[in-house]
Amino acid sequence: MADLNVYYNILIRCKANVEGALLAGIADANIKIQQLPKRGENVDAVPMVAIAKSETPVVDRPFSAENNAAREKIYGVDVVLIEAKNNFSVTEAQERWVEQIERSFHEETLAGAPTVCMVETRNFEPVNRQLLSKNYFYSGRTILFHSVEQRGN
């Protein structure tokens, strides 16, 4: 089972990383921890970056055969640039934003999240794109944070 405190801490640290990337043209107020807008929903302003728990369930498995108390948990976080559909054409700025977001997670650890020991990035691919609001285009990354925790966390 996922430790909600660890997951929330990872989300907070992700937001700090993205804010630290200094995305020109995106105010820090438009970098938010929130779920992606579902069909019929709108966001306050675009462009924005949504930082959300991934739809993929947390992986929870033994860390090693020798230490049964240690668990490896993999927390997925979607870091997604949201743009208005009617204004969308891929620009250098948008490509640069996604590249900057990815680079902000290049370390093997996550500052402020002491249990994270490995970070992987993948292209953002929602499990069910049909559930997302049709008013926007979405691009970004899914970041997988490998965390080593003691049983009970």
Image: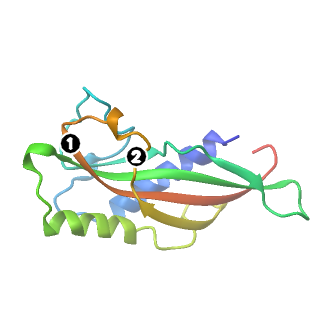
Judged left or right of residue 75, residue 22 is left
Choose top left, top right, bottom left or bottom right for residue 119: bottom right
Quadrant position of the C terminus in the picture = top right
Q: Are marks 2 and 1 in contact (CB under 8 Å)?
A: no
Judged left or right of residue 95, residue 116 is right
Instruction: Report, in whole angstroms, how far the alpha carbon at label 2 lies from the one at label 1.
Output: 14 Å
The tag on residue 15 is none
Assess disc 2: are there few (<14), some (14-19) or many (≥20) residues with their C-alpha within 10 Å of its C-alpha: some
Quadrant position of the N terminus in the picture = top right
Count the marks: 2
Q: Position of residue 50 (x, y in %)?
A: 34, 46
Q: Position of residue 96 (x, y in %)?
A: 23, 69
Judged left or right of residue 2, residue 123 is left
User: Which residue position is annotated with label 1?
Assistant: 136
Choose top left, top right, bottom left or bottom right for residue 42: top left
- Residue 21 in view, yes or no: no
Q: Kindly identify the residue that appears in the image at 21 percent across and 55 percent down.
A: 26
Q: Kindly identify the residue that appears in the image at 48 percent across and 44 percent down.
A: 53
Q: Amino acid at mark 1?
A: Tyr
Q: Kindly identify the residue that appears in the image at 40 percent across and 39 percent down.
A: 128
Residue 131 vs residue 64, the one in the foreground: 131
- In the rendered image of this protein, does residue 52 appear above or below residue 123? above
Disc 2 secondary structure class: loop
- In the rendered image of this protein, does residue 67 appear above or below residue 134? below
Disc 1 secondary structure class: strand
User: Which residue position is annotated with label 2?
Assistant: 126
Q: Amino acid at mark 2?
A: Pro
Judged left or right of residue 10, residue 63 is right
Residue 65 vs residue 118, the one in the foreground: 65
Q: Position of residue 118 (x, y in %)?
A: 61, 68
- Residue 98 in view, yes or no: yes
The outermost residue toward the top is 40
